[in-house]
Structures are given as C-alpha cells and as structure tokens.
Image: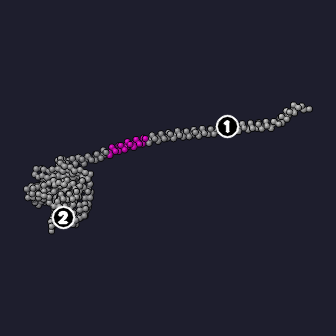
C-alpha cells in the first residue's frame, strides 16, 4: 500500500523531472559553448600576438633598413659634395694654370710698349693706347684684344664703292669706339676707289685680283683673326674665310720674320707718317700710327725702322697700310694723331673697332 507521502514524492519527481533535465542539459550545453568560445578567443589572441610580433619584427627591420639607407645616402651625398668640391678646385686650378701663359705673354709684349695711358674695356674688346717715341719719330700704338669677331669691321666711305670720308666721320656714323684708315686708293672721275682686292661682309667688291708687284691683302677672317699676304688664286684667299679686307704695300713681317722691303718703298719717301697693322701669337692686334709734319721725307718714320720696331715687339705679321696724309687714328671721337695735311683726309676704307 502506498502512503500519501510516497505518492507526493513520486508526483513531484514526475512533475519536476523534465524541468531538472532541461536545466541539466542547458548547464552542460552552456558550459561547452562557453568553453569553446574561450578556446576560440585564446586562438584568436594567439594569432593576433603572432601577427603583431611579425609586424613588429618587420617594422624593426624596416627601421634598420631605413637607417642604413639614410646613412648610405648621407655618405653618398658627402662623397658627391667632396667630389664636386675637388672637381671645382681642379677646374679652377686648371683654368688659372691655363690662363697663366696668356697672362705672362701679354705682360711680356705690353712691357715692350710701356704703360698704357688710356684703356678701353668691354665684354667685346680691350684697347690699350700707348705713346711711341724712340727718338727718331713719334706716334701711337694701340694694342687690341678682340673678344668677339664683330668688335672689328671695315667700312666704305659713305657706304658705297667709290665713296670716301674721314675716319672720324666713319667712327661717328657707325658709333665706333676707335678707327684707323685702311687700304690704298686710286682716284677716277671724281670718285675714290680702293686698290686691288677689297672685301666687305665676305663678298668681293670688284672681283678678285691676283696679287701683283708689291701689293698684299689684309683683313679679318670669320673667327676674328688677322689674315693677309699675297694671293695668286681666289681659292687661296677663300680658304682663309675672309670677312673683310683691303690692299696696299708692302709686307713688313710674315710668320715672325722680316720680309724684304722693295727699294722703291724704302726711299719714296724715306720718312713719312705711317699706319701699320699687325698681330701677335695670341691673335691680339697692334696698330702703329706715326706722325709727320709733311710728306717731303723730313719727318715721320722709315719702313725699315717700323719693321725693326715691330719685330722687337714680337709681332708675327705686319702690314703697311696707306700712310702720309691718309694716316689717322680716332679714339672715343677724338683725333689722336696729327694728320700731315692739317686735317683728316677722306679715304675709301676704314678699320673700325666697337665696344
């Protein structure tokens, strides 16, 4: 027989059993889920730690590489700077050394002229003006350094073939800083024509004429160098690439050697005003303009005297230009010499110099 108490316990167990089972299941299942989640979190944290360690190591290596690169760049920059400084020093030393022979040579030739009493300087030209007075004659020397080929030009009187004007007029018209008379001339029908071969702007004004008797051609080539001599064929002169030039007589020096002065020009006249142009080894030009009171032969210089003077000065090539009343030297708009006619003579060709 079942007692009431046992009946109640059995009923309670039957009633609460499912609930207790559910609770047990939830407990067991929840713990497993929580355990699994904990494992996942631990795994994730381990992955993160490992990844962080890898990234940190990579950053450390990158920093080390960057430091090495910066150091390398710094060393390279320092080496470049040192190399550049050294090269600049070498260039400066080489330039100075290269300029020394020119400076020494220039001092040597200048010492034979004395001290310039006037100097004209620009980026195109340097002109030094000297007085010449060896005792037997008086005159002026002009040493010219052409820094640009266009610093020297030849002009025609009134810009026409057969025209003439004074050197001062040509200097003023072309706004030149200096000028001298150039080649010889011959008068015909009221016009004054330059002698023999004459060139302007690279063109022959009256065709090429082979050198004859004592005539020579003198002028400047396209490189700004003085050229001249006797030419039997046009191709011989063309080979020198002349830009301009005129003709007269006679040659005084060629390649540093004295030439034979024809007897006619040694005595006709013996002494006279003279204009001579020449060049040095370094392509500097020299001009001598010698004064004389008249053309009777009682004053001025002989060609032999000038030849000796130029040779001792170290001039390489020298050409006697038209002299007498034609000799003229104009600097800064002023007539420097004393024209033997009492005034400047109009001539057909002039050598002008520009700042």
Question: Which residue is under mark 2?
Answer: 163
Picture coordinates of residue 134 (x, y %)? Answer: 12, 50
- In the displayed image of the protein, which residue is found farthest to the bottom? 189
The rendered magenta stretch, by its main secondary structure, is classed as: helix
Picture coordinates of residue 135 (x, y %)? Answer: 10, 50
Residue at the (23%, 62%) spot, across then down: 200
Distance from Cα at disc 2 to Cα at disc 1:
118 Å
Give the mark toward the camera: 2 or 1: 2
In this rendering, position of residue 86 left or right of residue 231:
right
Q: Callout 2: few (<14), some (14-19), or many (20+) C-alpha neighbours within 10 Å?
A: some
Which residue is at the front of the view, 336 or 242? 336
- In the displayed image of the protein, which residue is found farthest to the right? 1
Q: Earlier in the sequence, mark 2 or mark 1?
A: 1
Which residue is at the front of the view, 277 or 170? 170
The answer to whether residue 51 shows anywhere in this view is yes
Picture coordinates of residue 56 (x, y %)? Answer: 55, 39
Relative vertical location of residue 193 with respect to residue 64 in this rendering, above or below: below
Q: Callout 1: few (<14), some (14-19), or many (20+) C-alpha neighbours within 10 Å?
A: few
Residue at the (7%, 56%) spot, across then down: 298
Residue at the (75%, 38%) spot, across then down: 26
Quadrant position of residue 295: bottom left
What is the span of residues highlighted in magenta in the rendered image?
74-91
The label number, if any, that marks residue 38 in the structure image: 1
The label number, if any, that marks residue 108 in the structure image: none
């Amino acid at each position: 027989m079942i007692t009431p108490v046992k009946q109640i316990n059995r009923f309670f167990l039957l009633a609460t059993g499912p609930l207790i089972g559910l609770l047990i299941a939830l407990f067991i299942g929840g713990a497993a889920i929580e355990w699994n989640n904990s494992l996942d979190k631990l795994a994730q944290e381990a992955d993160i730690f490992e990844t962080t360690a890898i990234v940190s190591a990579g950053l450390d290596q990158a920093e080390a590489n960057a430091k090495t690169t910066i150091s390398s760049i710094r060393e390279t920059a320092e080496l470049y700077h040192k190399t550049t400084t050294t090269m600049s020093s070498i260039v400066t030393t080489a330039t100075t050394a290269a300029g020394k022979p020119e400076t020494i040579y220039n001092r040597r030739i200048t010492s034979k002229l004395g001290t310039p009493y006037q100097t004209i300087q620009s980026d195109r030209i340097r002109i030094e003006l000297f007085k010449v007075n060896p005792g037997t004659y008086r005159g002026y020397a002009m040493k010219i350094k052409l820094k640009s080929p266009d610093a020297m030009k030849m002009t025609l009187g009134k810009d026409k073939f057969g025209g003439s004007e004074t050197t001062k007029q040509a200097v003023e018209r072309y706004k030149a800083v200096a000028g001298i008379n150039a080649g010889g001339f011959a008068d015909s029908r009221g016009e004054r024509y330059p002698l023999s071969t004459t060139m302007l702007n690279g063109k022959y004004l009256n065709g090429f004429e082979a050198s004859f008797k004592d005539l020579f051609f003198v002028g400047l080539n396209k490189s700004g160098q003085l050229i001249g001599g006797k030419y039997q064929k046009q191709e011989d002169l063309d080979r020198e690439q002349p830009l301009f030039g005129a003709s007269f007589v006679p040659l005084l020096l060629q390649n540093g050697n004295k030439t034979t002065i024809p007897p006619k020009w040694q005595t006709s006249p013996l002494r006279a005003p003279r204009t001579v142009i020449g060049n040095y080894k370094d392509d500097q030009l020299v001009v001598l303009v010698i004064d004389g009171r008249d053309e009777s032969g009682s004053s001025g210089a002989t060609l032999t005297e000038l030849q000796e003077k130029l040779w001792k000065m170290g001039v390489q090539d020298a050409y006697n230009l038209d002299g007498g009343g034609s000799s003229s030297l104009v600097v800064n708009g002023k007539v420097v010499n004393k024209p033997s006619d009492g005034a400047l003579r109009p001539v057909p060709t002039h050598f002008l110099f520009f700042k």
